[in-house]
Image (spheres, rainbow, N blue to C red):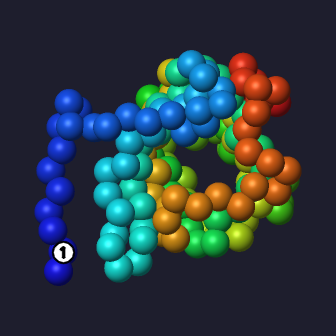
Amino acid sequence: MTESILKNQPDHKWEMMLPELGKDSPLFTLLRVDPQTNATTLMIDFPTALHIPKHTHEKSETHFLLRGSHLFENNDTGERFEVREGGYFYLPGHVVHEAWVPAGARAIIILEDGWKVNWLEGAPTAKDVGRSTP
């Protein structure tokens, strides 16, 4: 059975994505998790510029940029692409990629296999804070 979900901004419960980064941690709010497939829709807000190190996802990842931009690098092909406000990107599963995100960016992300990240060199740390461009 599928249920409708209707939310306005005051309904969002924001949490730190990387609590060890303190005030520099991106914030996320879960919008929907499919109870059968675990596909997850979330919104992420970046209060501080951040480098997102190389990683993959088992299944596809989709981004809709609401504010700011993301500079993505597909490490499999070496291609870089800046997705700007109002932009969109889709990556199939298992593509090695990383991103540089400026302060103030916000995106809605759909992860087909749930809120799972396969970090190849570890999750973002304090050394990644403030790195909005390579």
Where residue 56 sits in the image (x, y, percent)? 71, 62
119 left or right, relative to 70: right
**Quadrant in which the C terminus is drawn:** top right
Mark 1 packing: few (<14 Cα in 10 Å), some, or many (20+)?
few
For disc 1, the marked residue is: 2
Q: Is residue 59 above or below residue 108?
A: below
Q: Nearer the viewer, residue 72 or 116?
A: 116
**Quadrant in which the N terminus is drawn:** bottom left
134 left or right, relative to 87: right
Q: Quadrant of residue 72?
A: top right
Which amino acid does the dot numbered 1 rest on?
Thr
Q: Quadrant of residue 80?
A: top right
Residue at 65% x, 27% y is 21
Q: Is residue 62 above or below residue 70?
A: below
Residue at 57% x, 19% y is 23
Q: Nearer the viewer, residue 27 or 53?
A: 27
Residue at 42% x, 71% y is 38
Q: Is residue 36 above or below residue 9?
A: below
1 left or right, relative to 64: left
Q: Nearer the viewer, residue 119 or 71?
A: 119
Confirm whether residue 80 shows in the render.
no
Q: Nearer the viewer, residue 21 or 76?
A: 21
Where residue 2 sits in the image (x, y, percent)? 18, 74
